[in-house]
Amino acid sequence: MNRHGMTRRKFLVASAAGGAALAASPYLGFDAWAASEKASGEVKVTPTLCDACGNWCALRVYTKGDRVWKAEGIPIAGNNLGRVCAKGHAMLHEVYNPDRIKSPLKRVGPNKFEPISWQQAYKEIGAKLGQIKEKHGAESIFWLQYPEGNADVTFRFMNALGSPNVFSHGATCFLPRNIGWWLTVGNSKPEHDFANSRFILLIGRNLAAGLNLRKLQDVVKGRESGAKVVVVDPRFSESASIAKQWIRIRPGTDLALMLAVAHVMIDESLYQKEFVEKYTEGFEEFAEEVRKFPPSWAEEKTTVPKETIVTLAREMAKAAPRAVIHRGYHAAAGTQYKNSLQLVRAIACVNGLLGNYNQLGGLYPAPKVKLGKPDPNQYPAPPPVKGPMVDGSGDPERYPLTPKGVGISHAIPELAIQGKLKAGFVHHNNPLRTCPNPARVIEGYKKLDLLVSFDYVLSETATLAHYILPESYYLERDDVVHANHAYSSQQVAIRQQVVKPLYDTKPLVQILIELAQHLGIGQYFTFTLEDWNRAALKPLGVSLEQLKKEGVIDLGGQWQPGEPHFDTPSGKLEFVSSTLKDLELPAVPTWEEPLVSPDPKDPHSFRLIHGKQAHHTHARTANQPYLMKITTDQDWGRAWIHPDRAKKLEIKDGDCMTLTSSVGSGRMRARVTDGIHPDCIFLPSGYGIFSRNLTYAKKKGQGGFGYGVSYNDFLPTMFDPVLGHAMANEVIVKVTKTYT
Amino acid sequence: MPRYGIAIDTTKCIGCHACKVACQNHNGLEYDQKFNTIYQVDRGKYPSFSKEFVPAQCNHCENAPCERVCPTGAIYTSPEGVVLVHRNRCVGCKYCIEACPYKVRLIDHHEGISVKCWFCIDLVRQGGEPACVTTCPTQVRIFGDLDDPDSRVSRFIAENRAQPLRPDLGTKPKIFYKRS
């Protein structure tokens, strides 16, 4: 409890004294503590960027003395508009997580680690990597990350080493979404002006649990000014609870719905004709194709009544151009299905029929900030590495559309088994838990001659690493200047140190600068993090000091509706994708069956789907007692099953079930609910952490290690033929009641 | 003197629990002690299936059952209408916990006294709002003066005919709900 000289009692004192005006007030316990005990230090407020998920919300973190206390949002920050979620609050406590790594570690046996000095670690990694590079070439080295602010430095590092193999988590998350939009409108992430929309369709996206605080607020604003919000989802998602209508769809068939909606809009001549004529390419061909997919056909595929589909299309068209379909994320429009790319294309095309691009209440290209780079004369940069990645990303013969720098992260274990990858760096990523088929992933990562992790706890992946160079927790470090998440205007923000590092840890950029000296690439790392950040800010006319004081600075450039521009080969919105045509792939959105489907005759056969909860991020938060307590209080670790299906299997609410797929089996309790399509079982993601070194929540009796299962436990290693993504919902499980 | 209250719009609540943890942090509570909670109500069958998240915390009742049963007089109402506990008088007998129909009271692990939501009166008196209000991503809660008919909270309650939980109990809560 008291690891850092701060009892909870003193902390309470600290909190109460935050309200200085109350010091003498006799009302509640807190005040009395403040009066009776000496406060432990001054309240200080430091702006920084949250690291509880990938949104990087801007926070003002309050400290009392040297202790982190609480956080508030920064109102001007475009990505959270002053709001903070449960994760943002709870992950503040993670800095005091007793499971943290306290110094560089070297693995000396299975799950046996020895603290070593930074110098020894650098030296040994340098020697080992030198041998690997000499024997197998630089292409046998990879970097896997969650690409964020520091990514520019990691690309520089890998370029310097001479390897093209920089992976992100994209192939298990968003890949088809980005490619589909890029193919259709030339922008892989168009933004949404929800606040001004009159009709908002969320399909393949649950904003209220895969939280995006900005967009969620915009949807609510839109709703308050009269927008109809409709959610299409196999389950009654958290977004559905704030929507006007929930359309329950058979999982994997969202594409059929979109095609039928397009069919109705064109058939009934409801689309925005002027927009289509002026700004789109290939309409005739698209119209011809969707003629094959009337609502009656879609009803059979989706189980959505054809009347519902017709009404949806008419209502949306009526609100156009102030009607918008969300661009999608990890769900159906993400890496879940074989037809995900087609779905994204279809969503983009129906948005085209609505004529909403760069219009009020529609889609728009987010204003970009161009950050500066360190002067190459003073700080020479390595040349970029040409050629495709080892997994075939960027290779015209294999995965021509999968970008370098994203790659196919769940191919890494396969490539290691094939001997094509020998050494790797894993930063802010945990492939052993977040990639499909963990047994295979473990086998693959064990084959590596050198695995270096930068984790702050001994996660599943870090436990396999040969060396761990612990990065300081986000509250303890400065990061590279950040300008990615402003949405409707140009903003620049910075993550900075709130408290001094508790242990012998360093910021990633610092680690790379020091490590580079031992890898023979020191000439490219002569800068400091401060040099880098000053160079980044130079073109913006913002000083580092000013940015650190304010946390976020708005540079103006607010988006305004106007003439649409498309960075596609034709310069138009492409109903017929010229790029796909060149690659001899289906160039017009068309129906594609999901890869697998449950057996309708077998009462045990279900599709396994998954999704986020608002209080968990990936596999990172299941060891945080404040967050796990929410799960255990609400009993939200359960898997959802439809009452009719459950009845046939004699499963009652709360009963234990066993799920078995071709690669794995696991047990969980049932949540019998009408809020799910009968074809599928829904498993909340974020649980099933299996590193025995993550004990914090478990010691508090709140799950953590050993709590629940992950959908990855059931998922075979699969690669979509076009993009290579994981197709994470293309898995059939057998469900049986567990009698114990 | 204002008389503080909250209007809660459950049609906006997504059950994210930001309010719960923001409150825990501001008030220095451990992971297993909470001043606010969220109930989930499932209704109906598809296609009319719906789900409602209902946030709940101390209602700061005008006619507070907890205040009436407290044998040491530790529970009282502040000039702003906030029900508070006097730490030095509370003996931790838990009568108030039994008496509270909303089950929003708890015994503090360390001090052994009864604690609960106090409308973050420390922040409010400095011109701020309770932590649960300011953190909410969908702005479910509106905080303000119930005695001022022009305050946002009063107008919201009037426009939506917001009702307290279990008005039949006669506790006269100061938290009003717009329910779906």
Image (cartoon, coloured by chain):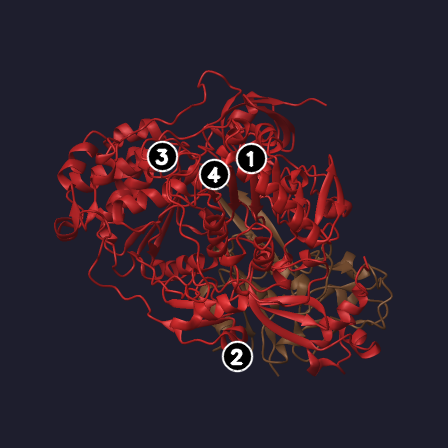
Relative to the observer, which residue lies in front, B21 or B55? B21
Residue count near mark 4 (Cα–Cα under 10 Å), binned few <14, some 14–19, many ≥20: many
Kindly identify the residue that appears in the image at 15 percent across and 33 percent down.
A288
In space, the residues marked 1 and 3 are separated at their CA atoms by 22 Å
Which lettered chain is shown in red? A
Mark nearest the camera among 1 and 3 is 1
Place of residue A711 in the rendered image (x, y in percent of width and height, measured from the top left) = 55, 33
Query: In the rendered structure, which amino acid carries the disc numbered 4?
Result: Glu
Counting from the top left corner in percent of width and height, residue A356 is at 25, 54
| Kind of element beneath mark 3 | loop
Dot label at residue A422: 1
State which chain disc 1 sits on.
Answer: A
Q: Which residue is mark 4?
A: A139
Q: Do dots 1 and 2 share one subunit?
A: no
Toward which corner of the image does residue A32 lie, by quadrant?
bottom right
As measured in the structure, the alpha-carbon distance from the residue carrying label 1 to the one carrying label 2 is 70 Å
Q: Is residue B11 above or below residue A641?
A: below
Kindly tell me whether residue B81 is visible in this rendering. Answer: no
Q: Which mark's residue is nearer the viewer, 3 or 2? A: 3
Q: Colour of chain B?
A: brown
Q: Say if labels 4 and 1 share a chain.
A: yes
Q: Which mark is residue B148?
A: 2
Amino acid marked by disc 3: Tyr
Q: Nearer the viewer, mark 4 or mark 3?
A: 4
* Residue ID for mark 3: A399
What amino acid does circle 1 point to? Lys
Disc 4, disc 1: CB below 8 Å?
no
Residue at 51 percent of width and 53 percent of height = A54
**Mark 4 to mark 3 CA distance (whole Å):** 17 Å
